[in-house]
């Protein structure tokens, strides 16, 4: 095994080799590209994006720390890819690090309960703090135990991150070597973008078909076997690890019972007594399909006497008009079933995950989704709230905690934008004059401050404190804290009735019903409902420090900090990732955080970069100084314009905002294409750009302090620094200048 690992990761002092002749036996680099397309570069670019999205999508389901920090996987993939670009002249063979990927799969999928428990508490062990709600808590008995748990968790996370870096490094080497050998760098970069778009949509197709990870990895291993250097021989260790990985993935799904891989998450359905079911999301208990049918009530009189006190049914005691009901986060159907039991006439049930809806329609014992009174809408909850014009007697927010994030490109969960003040304001707008808003949320120790946050936000939106109470689990109906609010004071009059007053007194919350000392409210600009305040949570700081340390060790010999071109490309990468993150996060407000929207936005960004390449190659010659100036001004304009107040419809405003973001992305693309085309060492420039993206990804954490919009200002600073190093730093260092071919600045020092 030692020799295999040595072959896979050559020593740092390995002598450079000639540019590769081919990694695909049919197409050799240097031959005229068939049909005008250099297939080797397209294939390695396809593989790079496919692997990146595969890792983001899969590892967050198996190792919870990555579910809460999915952009961490993205950043780590960038690090491995960028390191490979720097080392493109070294010995290459395999398309990607199959040995490290195999070890990663084995570590994540080991079928031992104690090992799974270790992976579950990594997040809290890295923080030992309650400043962010992570739905898992490690309570150490002693300080020594806490320190040991922290060190062990940090070591394990470091190993996992290093395995991801090692997986992506070889594919970065291949891309870097092809870009370096290309006679037309702008055209080669365009091929790289086309391959990336293809990789995105190939994986999107697999997700749409709800295929399991064994097929995802099977496709990756097929690429590994078919796309490789002619000199690379596949030894027994890679073959053994590939086989072991696929078998372990199959075994994990087989032993877990009924498994569904939706476009968003891993769903596991477990049968429980009385025709009820539990649904686990990413290996964690999430929802039930409870049975409160007439047959169940007749069979169990004790349950029949109590189910109306559950967190699902009790809110209806306070509601009079119930003709039109909206449920956002409808899940598998418990909320719809409760509404039907309590006399709702017409129900709109909004659910983002088609797999959860399909499971509920097939298995829910009360069959609420088969009722003619229920209309199911597969859409993002916030997108529906913003776009609909219907008026409702009751709006119910189901248990929307996502257990993960909507995108690997930001620190955002699916439900972040659902629980903001603006979202509650939109729900208030959709209520009829006497309508009631019902929000049910699981407020548990030690994160009881979340309940006080909700209480204060309702007070701010509706002008008076909500009616709030807690109900424990009854049968299959889960526990929850319930908040009720209305535009009509009649709700509070009903709550003061003796029977309901006694009910409220017997159902106290675990947090004080007081706005004093409440954490800051959640807004569309600061949508971090699971974070206590405007600080970077300790877990995020710990993981970021680990990644920064790995980055320093990996790049200290590759990144030449003395060259102005290194820092120019570094800040171009940092600025672009912040810009990309901003676009994805902001457009989710207008079009939803569905996987289709994310794929379209990412593809649109890459398409704009292709247009930038075309302009750089065939358009007029622009002075880089003017391009940088317009880019920075455009970012400031996007920051200052109150997009949410424009007198347009939601989709029209979102489309306008999307076009506004395309302007700085286009300018950044033209700047990069010109600058990249003029530099001499293409692989080092591309590597610096990717390492800069790592820094930009970590800089996203600053949004926990300053909010999301302010990242535009940080992006403007990054692009300003890139302009400084492109236009002035080299001259001030008295470096020898050469005339530009397609731009105003060349980097002779690269």
Image (cartoon, helix red, strand yellow):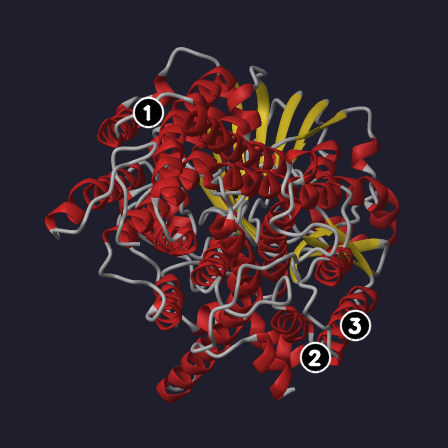
The answer to whether residue 477 is left or right of residue 14 is right
Name the residue beneath numbered marker 3.
243
Q: Horizontal and vertical percent for residue 336?
A: 71, 35
Query: Hey, which residue is sitting farthest top in the picture?
Result: 647
Depicted 690 relative to depicted 523: above or below: below
Mark 1 neighbour class, 10 Å CA radius: few under 14, some 14 to 19, many 20 or more: some
Question: How many circles with numbers are drawn on the protein?
Answer: 3
Please name which of the two marks, 1 or 2, marks the residue nearer to the observer.
1
The answer to whether residue 102 is left or right of residue 695 is right
Asked if residue 595 can be seen in this view, the reply is yes
Q: Quadrant of residue 109?
A: bottom right
Q: Quadrant of the C terminus?
A: bottom left
Q: Horizontal and vertical percent for residue 630?
A: 26, 26
Foreground residue, 347 or 535?
535
Q: Horizontal and vertical percent for residue 228?
A: 68, 61
Name the residue beneath numbered marker 2.
112
Q: Quadrant of residue 695?
A: bottom left
Q: Earlier in the sequence, mark 3 or mark 1?
A: 3
Callout 3: SS: helix
Name the residue beneath numbered marker 1.
621
Q: Quadrant of residue 716?
A: top left
Q: Are marks 2 and 3 in contact (CB under 8 Å)?
A: no
Foreground residue, 653 or 464?
653
Callout 1: SS: loop
Cα separation, mark 2 vs mark 3, equals 20 Å
Depicted 178 relative to depicted 541: above or below: above
Mark 2 neighbour class, 10 Å CA radius: few under 14, some 14 to 19, many 20 or more: few
The answer to whether residue 182 is left or right of residue 100 is left
Cα separation, mark 1 vs mark 2, equals 61 Å
């Amino acid at each position: 095994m030692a020799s295999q690992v040595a072959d896979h990761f050559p020593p740092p002092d390995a002598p450079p080799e000639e540019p590769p002749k081919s990694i695909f036996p049919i197409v050799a680099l240097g031959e005229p590209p068939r049909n005008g397309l250099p297939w080797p570069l397209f294939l390695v670019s396809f593989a790079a994006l496919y692997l990146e999205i595969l890792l983001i999508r899969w590892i967050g389901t198996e190792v919870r720390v990555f579910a809460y920090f999915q952009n961490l996987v993205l950043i780590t993939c960038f690090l491995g890819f960028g390191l490979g670009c720097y080392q493109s002249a070294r010995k290459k063979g395999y398309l990607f690090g199959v040995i490290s990927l195999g070890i990663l799969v084995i570590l994540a999928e080991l079928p031992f309960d104690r090992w799974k428990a270790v992976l579950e508490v990594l997040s809290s062990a890295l923080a030992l703090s309650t400043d962010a709600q992570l739905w898992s808590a490690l309570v150490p008995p002693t300080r020594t135990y806490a320190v040991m748990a922290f060190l062990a968790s940090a070591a394990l996370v470091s190993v996992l991150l290093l395995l991801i870096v090692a997986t992506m490094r070889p594919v970065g080497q291949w891309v870097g070597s092809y870009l370096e050998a290309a006679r037309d760098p702008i055209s080669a970069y365009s091929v790289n973008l086309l391959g990336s778009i293809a990789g995105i949509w190939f994986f999107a197709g697999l997700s749409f078909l709800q295929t399991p990870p064994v097929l995802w990895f099977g496709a990756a291993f097929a690429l590994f076997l078919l796309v490789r250097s002619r000199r690379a021989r596949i030894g027994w260790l890679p073959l053994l690890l590939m086989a072991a990985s696929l078998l372990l993935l199959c075994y994990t799904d087989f032993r877990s019972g009924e498994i569904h891989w939706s476009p968003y998450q891993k769903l596991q359905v477990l049968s429980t007594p009385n025709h009820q079911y539990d649904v686990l999301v990413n290996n964690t208990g999430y929802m039930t399909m409870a049975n409160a049918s007439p047959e169940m009530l007749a069979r169990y009189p004790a349950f029949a006497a109590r189910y109306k006190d559950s967190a699902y049914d009790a809110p209806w005691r306070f509601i009079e008009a119930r003709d039109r009901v909206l449920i956002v986060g409808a899940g598998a159907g418990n909320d719809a079933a409760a509404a039907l039991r309590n006399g709702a006439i017409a129900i709109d049930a909004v659910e983002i995950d088609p797999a959860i809806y399909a499971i509920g329609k097939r298995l829910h014992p009360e069959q609420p989704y088969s009722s003619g009174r229920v209309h199911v809408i597969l859409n993002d909850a916030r997108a529906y709230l913003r776009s609909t014009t219907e008026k409702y007697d009751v709006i119910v927010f189901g248990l929307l905690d996502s257990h993960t994030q909507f995108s690997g490109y930001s620190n955002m969960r699916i439900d972040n934008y659902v629980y903001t003040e603006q979202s509650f304001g939109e729900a208030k707008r959709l209520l009829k004059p006497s309508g009631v808003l019902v929000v049910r949320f699981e407020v548990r120790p030690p994160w009881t401050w979340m309940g006080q946050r909700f209480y204060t936000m309702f007070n701010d939106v509706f002008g008076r404190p909500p009616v709030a109470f807690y109900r424990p689990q009854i049968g299959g109906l889960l526990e929850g804290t319930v908040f009720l609010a209305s535009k009509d004071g009649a709700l509070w009059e009903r709550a003061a009735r003796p029977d309901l007053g006694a009910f409220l007194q017997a159902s106290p919350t675990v947090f004080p019903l007081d706005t004093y000392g409440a954490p800051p409210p959640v807004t569309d600009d600061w949508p971090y409902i699971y974070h206590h305040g405007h600080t970077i949570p300790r877990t995020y700081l710990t993981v970021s420090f680990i990644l920064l340390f790995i980055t320093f060790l990996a790049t200290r010999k590759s990144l030449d900090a003395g060259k102005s071109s290194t820092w120019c490309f570094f800040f171009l990468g940092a600025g672009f990732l912040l810009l990309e993150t901003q676009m994805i996060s902001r457009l989710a407000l207008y079009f939803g955080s569905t996987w289709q929207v994310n794929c379209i936005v990412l593809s649109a960004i890459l398409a704009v970069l292709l247009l930038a390449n075309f302009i750089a190659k065939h358009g007029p010659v622009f002075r880089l100084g003017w391009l940088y100036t317009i880019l920075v001004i455009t970012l400031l304009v996007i920051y200052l314009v109150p997009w949410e107040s424009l007198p347009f419809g939601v989709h029209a405003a979102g489309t306008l905002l999307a076009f506004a973001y395309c302007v700085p992305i286009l300018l950044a693309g033209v700047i990069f294409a010109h600058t990249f085309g003029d530099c001499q060492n293409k692989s080092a420039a591309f590597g610096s750009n990717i390492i800069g993206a790592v820094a930009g990804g970590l800089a996203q954490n600053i949004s926990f302090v300053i909010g999301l919009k302010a990242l535009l200002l940080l992006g403007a600073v990054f692009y300003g620094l890139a302009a400084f190093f492109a236009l002035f730093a080299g001259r001030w260092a008295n470096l020898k200048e050469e005339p530009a071919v397609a731009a105003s600045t060349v980097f002779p020092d690269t």
